Amino acid sequence: MNTKALHQAVHSAVLNEWDPIGIRNIPEAQDEYVAYVPRICELLKLPDSRNDVSSYLWWLATEQMGISENRQVTEDFTDRLIQIATTMKETEQ
C-alpha cells in the first residue's frame, strides 16, 4: 500500500470527517492532527486492526485531547478508516 497516499487520505478523513476538536475550518490549524496520522496508518496496515484503531481513536479524543467523545462516533469513524484502507489496497492490486 502506498504509504504517502494512505497518510494523505487518513489525514483528510481525520480533519474533515472526524475532527473531534472542531478545527476543520480554521486555516492555521490544518496540521493539528498530523502527528496522529502515522500511528493510525500503522494500525490500519495490521490484520484485524479494528479494535486497535478504535481504541487509539478513543484514547486520542478522551485522554490526549481531553474531550467527551461519543463511542458510536468513534466506532463509525473507525469503520470509515478501514474502508479507506481497504479501498486503497484493492485499487493497488
Image (cartoon, rainbow, N blue to C red):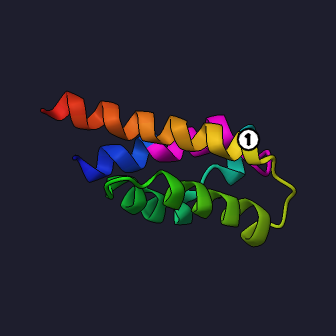
**Judging from the image, what secondary structure is the residue with disc 1 in?**
helix
Image coords of residue 90 (percent x, y): 22, 31
Question: Magenta span covers which residues?
Answer: 10-23
Classify residue 76 as left or right of residue 86: right
Examine the image and state in which quarter residue 47 appears. bottom left
The furthest residue to the left: 93
The residue depicted at 41 percent of the width and 45 percent of the height is: 8
Classify residue 8 as left or right of residue 11: left
The residue depicted at 32 percent of the width and 30 percent of the height is: 87
Magenta-colored segment: predominant secondary structure:
helix
Q: Label 1: which residue?
A: 72
Q: Does the magenta portion include 64?
A: no
Q: Nearer the viewer, residue 60 or 4?
A: 60
| The C terminus, quarter of image | top left
Image coords of residue 69 (percent x, y): 81, 52
Q: Does the magenta portion include 14?
A: yes
Image coords of residue 54 (percent x, y): 58, 54
